[in-house]
Every structure is written in C-alpha cells, then in structure tokens.
Amino acid sequence: MKNTLFDLSDSVAVVIGGTGALGGAMASALGEAGARVAVAGRNKERGQARRDEITKAGGEAEFFPVDASSRESLHALRQAITEKFGNPTTLVNAAGGNDPRVTVTADHAFENITAEDWNENFNLNLVGGVLLPCQEFGPAMCAAGRGSIINIASVSAHLPLSRVVAYSAAKAAVLNLSSFLSREWARQGVRVNTITPGFFPAEQNKRLLFNEDGTPTERGRSILNHTPMGRLGKADELAGATVFLASDAASSFITGTDIRVDGGFLSQTI
Ligand SMILES: NC(=O)c1ccc[n+]([C@@H]2O[C@H](COP(=O)([O-])OP(=O)(O)OC[C@H]3O[C@@H](n4cnc5c(N)ncnc54)[C@H](OP(=O)(O)O)[C@@H]3O)[C@@H](O)[C@H]2O)c1
C-alpha cells in the first residue's frame, strides 16, 4: 500500500537558504518526498549543484536567486516560482547564521559590539531570515487556503549560548514570531512551525567548531560533551522533521510547535 502520509507530490516547496548546508539537505528531503523544489539563495553555483542533485535523484527542482533581505527580491522570487511550479505550498526559511563581529570573545567585549553590526546580524536572522519571507509568501498561502511554513531556530533561542549574543536574541525572536504567525494564520489553512537544530557542521559555524586541522576546538569539544548523543548532527538528519512538518497529511493539526533535532542538547543540565 502506498504511504500517503509523507507524499509531497502535490506540493511546491521553497527553501530560502537552500544553497546552505542545512537548507540544502532540507531541499533534498522535500524533493525526495515528491515536492517540486525551489532552491533559493544567493550562491548560484551551490544552488545549481543542489538542483542537479535533486533532479539526478529523480526529483523536480530549480535554482532561483534571491536576496532575502529585500522584499522586492522576495516578491520576484515568488512570482518566478509560481510561474514555473505553481503556488508555493511549503516555505522553509533557512537563511541565517552567526557572525564573528557580534560574537563575544576575549578580544571583543560585549560592550564593544556596534549597533550596526548587531542590526546586520539580527536582521539577517529575523528580518530577512523569517519576517520578510513570511510577509511575502504567507498571505498568498492564506489566500490559497493551504501552506506550511518551517522556520529554523537554534538551541540558542531557548537558552542563550555563551558568546553568540545577537544571533541568540534573533533566534529567540524567530520562535516568538513563529508562534504569533501560527495563531494568526491557523484559520486560513497555513501552519507555522519551527525546527531547532542542535549542532551541525556548516559554513557559518565551522571556525567555531573546528581547528584548521579538523580537530574540534575547545568550544567544539564542550558542545560534544554537552550533547547526550555525544556527536554533531548530520544535515540529512533534518529530513524527517522537515517532511513531517511540510506534509498536510502527517501534521495537519500541528501548528505553533518547535521540533528539536539536537541529539538531546536541550535536555542536558548536569
Ligand atoms: N549548522 C548548525 O549547527 C545550525 C544550528 C542551528 C541553527 N542553524 C540555522 O540553520 C540555518 C542554515 O544555516 P547553515 O548552518 O546551513 O549555514 P550555511 O551553510 O552557512 O547556510 C546559510 C544560508 O543562509 C543563506 N543566506 C544568508 N544571507 C542570505 C540572504 N541575504 N539572502 C538569501 N540567503 C541568504 C546562505 O545563502 P547564500 O550562500 O546563497 O548566500 C546560505 O544558504 C541558519 O538559520 C542557521 O542559523 C544552523
């Protein structure tokens, strides 16, 4: 018997940040489940490589350039996707990341972080990362009566990690905004949920986790010691949560929730 719970063949999925490590893996998972996938981001090479990977595996995908910090660019993205694939039904917001300029270190004290640098990182993670894409795609999904929005939070949204201050504040706001939108759009058939990844190797955090020779940094070791499963995540371990939340059949009554994919990180105290 065909399993229809996780069949996305009637879905059009947009993954903003589909050019990155986690967004890319989420795009692949959605493609494998049958969705037509718009891989969106700024980096054409990585976007096209991800598109090729999905199509080679038998899926349907295209790369669409977008600057998530620009509402105009997001509007053009939505139009281009709608022309190519039809109305988007799933939106994954995976653009974001930390920045050394807003990271507290022995040489860079909290009080020396400039408002400009703070705003840039905060805006990347909250405004371009979540607010503007939701403003652009959410109302169209509401008008169509169908949509699943998946925003990416962080363990640092729940209890701030040391050092990553603007990022943590922005990710906490991602949880809050997602709850707000889940309530606003529930009656219009649009579900809004978050995924909280633990620690996964990616471009934006590799200097924090690894030395140049590939061994874990002191912080990397401390993260591993604090993770009950004792290891980092692999990007494709986000596939299950992504397809589950994207599927109207599998998660029809689920909105405003957060799924932790963190190897137990947030359950660990002493
Ligand atoms: N890796 C982890 O351990 C971890 C843990 C918790 C949460 N997260 C979150 O997961 C998400 C994905 O991060 P990642 O770890 O996969 O890092 P990554 O590989 O560095 O990906 C970051 C993505 O953000 C995109 N992006 C940044 N600015 C953009 C803009 N203005 N317009 C469009 N796209 C933009 C990048 O696209 P281009 O390269 O095309 O510009 C890239 O695809 C982020 O929200 C991150 O905070 C990651």
Image (spheres, rainbow, N blue to C red):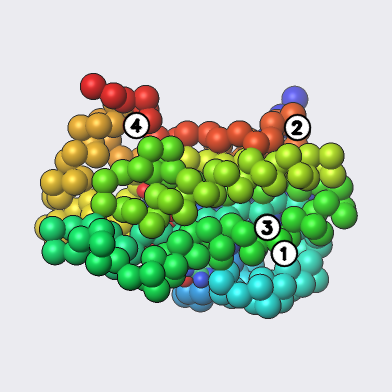
Residue hosting label 4: 265
Residue hosting label 1: 136
C-alpha separation, residue under disc 2 versus residue under disc 1:
23 Å
Q: Are marks 3 and 1 in contact (CB under 8 Å)?
A: yes
Image quadrant occupied by the C terminus: top left
Mark 4 vs 3, N-terminal side: 3
The image shows residue 22, relative to residue 258, as above or below, that is below
SS type, badge 2: loop
- In the shown orientation, is residue 206 left or right of residue 129? left
Within 10 Å of disc 2 (Cα), the crowding (few <14, some 14-19, many 20+) is: some
Q: Position of residue 2 (x, y in %)?
A: 74, 30
Mark 4 vs 1, N-terminal side: 1
Which label belongs to residue 252?
2
Which label belongs to residue 134?
3
C-alpha separation, residue under disc 4 versus residue under disc 1:
33 Å
Q: Position of residue 267 (x, y in %)?
A: 37, 25
Answer whether residue 60 is visible to the viewer in this image.
Answer: no
Three-letter residue code for mark 4 = Phe
- In the shown orientation, is residue 196 left or right of residue 130? left
